[in-house]
Image (cartoon, rainbow, N blue to C red):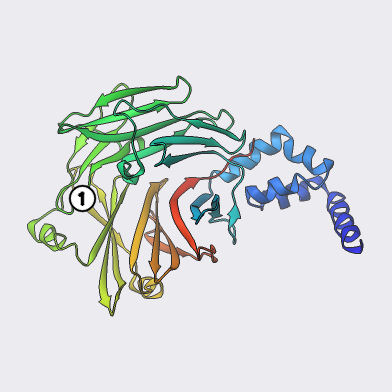
Amino acid sequence: MDEYHSSDTNALGFCLLPSELIQSILFSLALPEILRMKLVNKFLSYLISDKDFIRQCNLRSRSATWLFVYKKRWRRDAILHGFSDQSNRWFKISSGNIFLFASNSQKAVIAVNLVSKAVKKIPPCPLGPRGTSSWRRSGMKLVPESSDSGLFRFLFVELVGNSPVVFEYNSETEKWQCREAREGKGNFAGNDCMFLNAHNAPQESLVVAIGSEYIPPLILRPRFGNREQQASWVNVNDRRHVYGDGHVMIMRSRDQRRAKVLCSIEVWGISLRSGNWEYVSNVPSEIVEQIGKPYGVMIGCLEARNGRIRVVLMSNYEGSWDIIWLTYHQQSGVWNWVLLPDCKMKGANLAGITFSSGLSLT
């Protein structure tokens, strides 16, 4: 009873602060924390529901990047956890933007709106039902519309015969449309283009650059610049490649007993002049040494957006999971290692991992 009374008194004292100070404190919180404050009392609920507060909150949240980990325990429900680069802990995500999940049993893509709690199966694409093994992370993209509309576009590229075709689903029309990519050199601005990988290989990749809906998608075949570079990446036994947004991350490892240990990480990007891979940067050796834990299996995710390249590496060694988040600021040329608290992955299977821009308050 005393604990309840103390909590109630603290909430009342907080609400007696000047409104400008209350807003400043709320703006410093992550979105899940703001939503939790909304449940404290009517005053905070009214304040957080105000249109001006929502607008300012969403403007601030645009600068945040979220890492989402979708994990599942044996014979239990799956759980979605999120971590923001502007917070210091993981959140169980129960509200936010649109998420897409691939269902292997139904061979379908499921759209989940965590705000409206709506769950909807996307109609099969023109290629027919597809299992989870048919999707490549670097070959698809979810593009949400305005934060309060709940609408989105889902694009992916696939080789049909020998030609890459872009398939796009529009949630407003609930229809698919197809566009075949064309060969040839064209002018495209990297900031205005979406890059989807149709085929990944150490020597040559097949990437589709998508710009305006009125311009056919353009086929790019990035290669490393000379034969020495091409030959150096052919031996994939000690290397892993992670593709995304017109970039490739190359991780080199060395053997250590029955495991591997990272020893170097490089990032390359598609040159807007030649269309080939162009060296961008390498992770400093001192950071590599700190993150270089033994691993048996490693997967990764790469995102390039607003002048920053974000990389997440998720590894498993003898049943223990480890997550590494690295960010490269292209203008300053500085790498940052985002320290992550324990995500409590022990005993769980990884069902998905991705980056996203800031969540929205509606």
Relative to 262, is 116 above or below?
above
Relative to 8, is 286 above or below?
below
Q: Quadrant of residue 176?
A: top left
Nearer to us in this view, 339 or 285? 339
- Image position, residue 19 (x, y; %): 80, 45
Residue at image position (84%, 49%) is 15
Nearer to us in this view, 347 or 218? 347
Relative to 291, is 176 above or below?
above
- Image position, residue 115 (x, y; %): 61, 36
How many marks can you see?
1
Residue at image position (33%, 69%) is 296
Residue at image position (12%, 57%) is 230
Query: Is disc 1 surrounded by few (<14), some (14 to 19) or many (20+) residues within 10 Å?
Result: many
Q: Is residue 355 at all visible to an observer of this figure?
A: yes
Q: Quadrant of residue 240?
A: bottom left
Q: Quadrant of residue 165?
A: top left
- Image position, residue 131 (x, y; %): 34, 40
Apparent side of residue 29 relative to residue 157 in the rendered image (left or right): right
Q: Is residue 330 at all visible to an observer of this figure?
A: no
Residue type at the position of mark 1: Trp
- Image position, residue 61 (x, y; %): 58, 45
Apparent side of residue 40 relative to residue 231 in the rendered image (left or right): right
Instruction: Name the quarter where the C terminus is drawn.
Output: top right
Looking at the image, the residue that sits furthest to the bottom is 257
Looking at the image, the residue that sits furthest to the left is 227
Residue tagged 1:
277
User: Judging from the image, what secondary structure is the residue with disc 1 in?
Assistant: strand
Looking at the image, the residue that sits furthest to the front is 75
Residue at image position (70%, 38%) is 53
